Image (cartoon, rainbow, N blue to C red):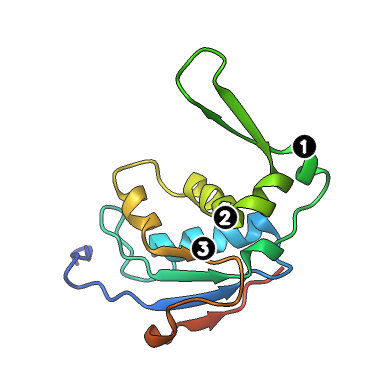
Amino acid sequence: MKTYSAKPTDVEHKWYLIDAKGMNLGRLSTKIAQLLMGKHKPAYTPNVITGDIVVVINCAKIKVTGNKLTDKFYYKHSGYPGGLKETSLKEMLEKHPNRVIEHSVAGMLPKNKLRDKMLLNLKVYPTTDHKHEAQKPELIKVEA
C-alpha cells in the first residue's frame, strides 16, 4: 500500500471562526496553529499547505496567566547601535492586539518557507466585526 501525499490542487480549504474572548493565549494559539498546518486532516502532508483559513475575533479580550502582562516583552531592533525597542504585552494589547496572536502563532508554525504562506491564512480582528461573512466560516469552540 502506498502512502498518500496530498497535492496543492487536491486540497480544499475550509473557513473557521474562533472567538478569542476570555481565551488563554497559549491554548488558543496552539489550536490556531494546528488548523493552519492541517494537522487535523487525514490528508496532512508536511510539504503542502493542507490547512484551513482561520478568522479570529475579539483578540483584544484574550487573557494570560501570571504576571505576563507586565513581565512579557516583545523586542525589535532597528539595526543601528542602541536601536533595541521593547514593548510589554499590556502595551501591545492596547495598541496592536492582533499582533500578539500573530506573533504567538508564528512561533508555533514550522520554520520553513511555508510559514509565511500559512500566516496569510490567519485573519485576526480586535472586535467582533470582520469582513468574511460571505465565506460562512464555521464557528469552532476552543476549550479554555
Side (left or right) of 19 relative to 72: left
Q: Tell which circle, 3 or 1, labels the residue nearer the N-terminal end.
A: 3
* Amino acid at the residue labelled 2: Ile
Task: Residue at 36% x, 66% y: name it.
Answer: 51
Q: Which residue is mark 2?
A: 101
- Residues 87 and 138: in front is 87
* Amino acid at the residue labelled 3: Ile
Name above or below for residue 56 compared with residue 93: below
Task: Residue at 47% x, 48% y: name it.
Answer: 106
Name above or below for residue 79 compared with residue 45: above
C-alpha distance separating marks 2 and 3: 9 Å
* Amino acid at the residue labelled 1: Asp
Count neighbours of disc 1 (C-alpha within 10 A) and say few if under 14, some if 14 to 19, many if 20 or more: few
Q: Is residue 39 visible?
A: no
Q: Position of residue 127 (x, y in %)?
A: 61, 71
- Residues 111 and 47: in front is 111
- Residue 71's label in the rendered image is 1
Name above or below for residue 86 compared with residue 6: above
Q: Which residue is mark 3?
A: 32
Q: Quadrant of the N terminus?
A: bottom left
Task: Residue at 32% x, 74% y: name it.
Answer: 13
Q: Position of residue 108 (x, y in %)?
A: 50, 48
Q: Position of residue 83 (x, y in %)?
A: 54, 20
Tell me the element at label 1: helix
Q: Quadrant of residue 140?
A: bottom right
Tell me the element at label 3: helix
Side (left or right) of 83 relative to 51: right
Q: Tell which circle, 1 or 2, labels the residue nearer the N-terminal end.
A: 1
Q: Is residue 118 visible?
A: yes
C-alpha distance separating marks 1 and 2: 17 Å
